[in-house]
Amino acid sequence: MRPYIICHMVESLDGRINCDMTEKIESGDEYYTALDALNCDSSLSGKITSVLHYATGEFESKGTPIGRIVWHKAMEGVGFDIITDTRGTLCYDDNMNGDKNMLILMSEQATDDYLDYLKSQGISYLVVGKERIDLQAAMELLSEHFDVKRLAVCGGGNINGSFLREGLLDEISMLIAPGIDGRKGMTASFDGATMDIEPSRLSLQSLERMGDSVWMRYTTTTTSKNAFAET
């Protein structure tokens, strides 16, 4: 069994998600108000988000790739702020984000000395996938070993797109903020697919006005039928 997985994003009217831009066009805390309402015990974001908000520098590894599936749960009874970092490269001065224990999700290219570093910092980790993170296996292991029941994916376009293409998203929670970006080449909420990929059909479940923003919740055709679907 895997968690019930919701992709939660805020974007401009033209579908762009640059954080500096969305902060300028949001009228308040609608994004976080909606995120809280989703009742997710854990969240997941990417390395770029970590560099911007959490990381304090690069880890200088002298170790060797771990080469196997391994995990470490540093704390019990809390949710997790999960950061995808394929090779394990970043340093942190805290093991918490709010009330959530940080958890670094990596491939088997992560080194043994980096895992020792994370453990010494009280940071949880999960290593799965040979050259890249195996998302399917990772979601099952997060449920089994970390008790993650409802996961909010708040990544960049490529991470969100990977979850979508893997059939791992049960729900899309999209907040349309009152503004337009318009800049050429800016990342969209779902990105990185090749031109031969078919569009994903969704089913609208709810529509709500939040200030000048619109909050829409959709289910996907792969919606999980597990016990964690209901808020």
Image (cartoon, rainbow, N blue to C red):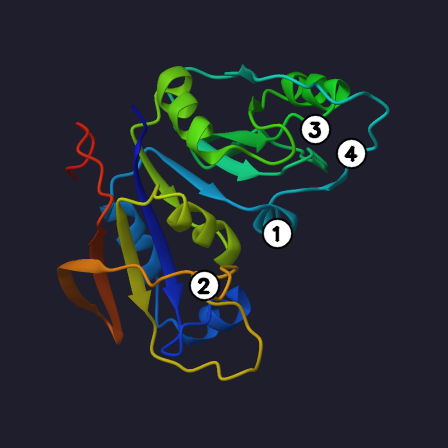
Q: Earlier in the sequence, mark 4 or mark 1?
A: 1
Spot the residue most to the front.
196
- The numbered dot on residue 196 is 2
Q: Residues within 10 Å of mark 4 (few under 14, many from 20)?
A: some
Q: What amino acid is labelled 1 in the image?
A: Ile
Name above or below for residue 10 compared with residue 77.
below
Mark 1 packing: few (<14 Cα in 10 Å), some, or many (20+)?
some
Name the secondary structure under disc 4.
loop
Instruction: Please give left or right for residue 14 compared with residue 202 in the image.
Output: right
- Tell me the mark number nearer the camera, choosing from 1 and 2: 2
Q: Nearer the viewer, residue 166 or 30?
A: 166
**What residue is rendered at 71% in x and 21% in y?**
117
Q: Residue 109: which disc?
A: 3
Front of the two marks 1 and 3: 3
Tell me the element at label 2: loop
What label does residue 59 carry, if any?
Answer: 4
Crowding around mark 3 (Cα neighbors within 10 Å: few <14, some 14 to 19, many 20+) is many
Q: If the image is split into quadrants, where does the C terminus sit?
A: top left
Residue tagged by mark 1? 48
Closer to the observer: label 4 or label 2?
Answer: 2
Estimate the spatial distance between the alpha carbons at disc 4 and disc 2, rounded to whole Å: 38 Å
Q: Quadrant of residue 199?
A: bottom left
Amino acid type of the residue tagged 4 in the rendering: Phe
Task: State if disc 2 and disc 1 touch (CB < 8 Å).
Answer: no
Badge 2: how crowded within 10 Å, few (<14), some, or many (20+)?
A: few
Provide residue 69's location: percent of width, then percent of height.
57, 17
Three-letter code, disc 3? Gln
- Measure how far apart labels 4 and 1 are at the Cα level: 15 Å
x and y percentages locating residue 139 in the rendered image:
40, 30
- Quadrant of the image containing the N terminus: top left
- Kindly identify the residue that appears in the image at 65 percent across and 49 percent down: 51
